Image (spheres, grey):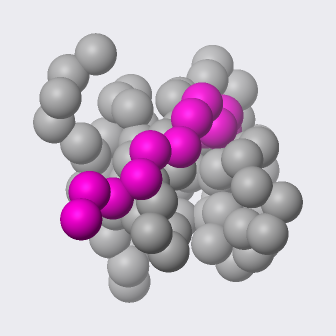
C-alpha cells in the first residue's frame, strides 16, 4: 500500500461510497469523490482519520456507479 493518499474533493461528482465505520457518520458524508478509487482512503472526521479500503463491489445510486470502500480502522490526529 502506498503512503500517498488519494485526494478527497468537494464539488466533484461522487464516485465512492463509504461502508462501515462509526455509526455517527452521516449518510451525506458517506458518498464522495476520490481521485484514486484503487487506493486506501483516509478521511478526517473530527479529531480522527477514518481509513477505508476499496472493495471489488460497486453500487448504483441515483444513476451513478459508486465504488464501495469498507472501513478498516481509525487513527487519531497527533497534537
| Position of 51 relative to 38 (above/below) | below
| Position of 32 relative to 74 (above/below) | below
x, y percent for residue 59: 76, 43
Q: Which residues are magenta?
A: 68-79
* Left or right: where 6 falls relative to 38: left
Helix, strand or loop: magenta stretch: strand
53 or 32, nearer to the observer:
53
Residue depicted at 57% across the width and 35% down the height:
73
- Residue 9 sits in quarter: bottom left
x, y percent for residue 77: 33, 59
User: For the N terminus, which image quadrant?
Assistant: top left
* Left or right: where 10 falls relative to 20: left
Q: Which residue is situated farthest in the right direction here?
A: 23
Residue depicted at 52% across the width and 29% down the height:
53
* Left or right: where 2 falls relative to 74: left
Circle count:
0
Is residue 25 inside the magenta stretch?
no
Amino acid at each position: 500500500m502506498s503512503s500517498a493518499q488519494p485526494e478527497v474533493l468537494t464539488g466533484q461528482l461522487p464516485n465512492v461510497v463509504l461502508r462501515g465505520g462509526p455509526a455517527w457518520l452521516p449518510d451525506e458524508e458517506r458518498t464522495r469523490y476520490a481521485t484514486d478509487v484503487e487506493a486506501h482512503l483516509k478521511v478526517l472526521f473530527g479529531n480522527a482519520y477514518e481509513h477505508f479500503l476499496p472493495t471489488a463491489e460497486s453500487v448504483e445510486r441515483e444513476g451513478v456507479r459508486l465504488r464501495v470502500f469498507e472501513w478498516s480502522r481509525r487513527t487519531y490526529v497527533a497534537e
